[in-house]
Amino acid sequence: EKSIFEMILDKELESEIIYEDEDIFSIKDINPIAPVHLLIIPKKRINTINDVSEEDTLLIGKMVQVAKKLAKEYEINQSGYRLIFNTNDDGGQTVYHIHLHLIGGEKLKW
Ligand code: 5GP
């Protein structure tokens, strides 16, 4: 069964793709919690951070590189931002296809 993000990538679900390369794509979160709230997503389906293998190490690093680039593009690199991987139930994960939240554009409370 496809994840929501795989459906977006396959154009079965509408969402503007704001960044894409061979391995990674990015979209705006449908329910933003701050002025900038982007999701950086590997094209490869990995259900949770618990399922990241040794061979995914470079991919995870590339996700951080994309986050850094987008933070600059959205002009929050200097003001600051937060990068988050929610994992499983207590972590608040709702989509079981790993994604890095890039959140900023205001002083974050928590
Ligand atoms: P999680 O809670 O798993 O860490 O994050 C999943 C995120 O995906 C949530 O913040 C939610 O708002 C976002 N989301 C869920 N469905 C869609 C969708 O169809 N389109 C977009 N752009 N974001 C979505």
Image (spheres, helix red, strand yellow):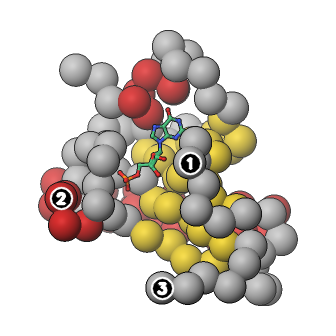
Q: Which residue is at a point 29% across and 61% down the rendered structure image?
A: 92
Q: Secondary structure at mark 3?
A: loop
Judge from the rendering whether residue 20 lies leftward or rightward of residue 74; answer left or right.
left
Q: Give the numbered dot on residue 89.
A: 2
Looking at marks 2 and 3 on the same chain, the residue that comes earlier in the sequence is marked by 2
Pick the quarter of the image with the N terminus. Answer: top left
Q: Position of residue 12 (x, y in %)?
A: 50, 13
Q: Secondary structure at mark 1?
A: loop
Q: Give the numbered dot on residue 5.
A: none
Determine whether the beta carbon of the residue marked 1 sits less than 8 angstroms from the nearest atom of ligand 1. yes
Looking at marks 2 and 1 on the same chain, the residue that comes earlier in the sequence is marked by 1
Inspect the image, locate mark 1, and give the three-letter code of the amino acid beneath it: Asn
Inspect the image, locate mark 3, and give the three-letter code of the amino acid beneath it: Trp
- Is residue 33 at all visible to an observer of this figure? yes
Q: 64 and 34: which one is in front?
A: 34
Q: Is residue 87 placed above or below 25 in the rendered structure?
A: below
Q: 88 and 18: which one is in front?
A: 88
Q: Quadrant of residue 11?
A: top right
Q: Give the numbered dot on residue 31.
A: 1
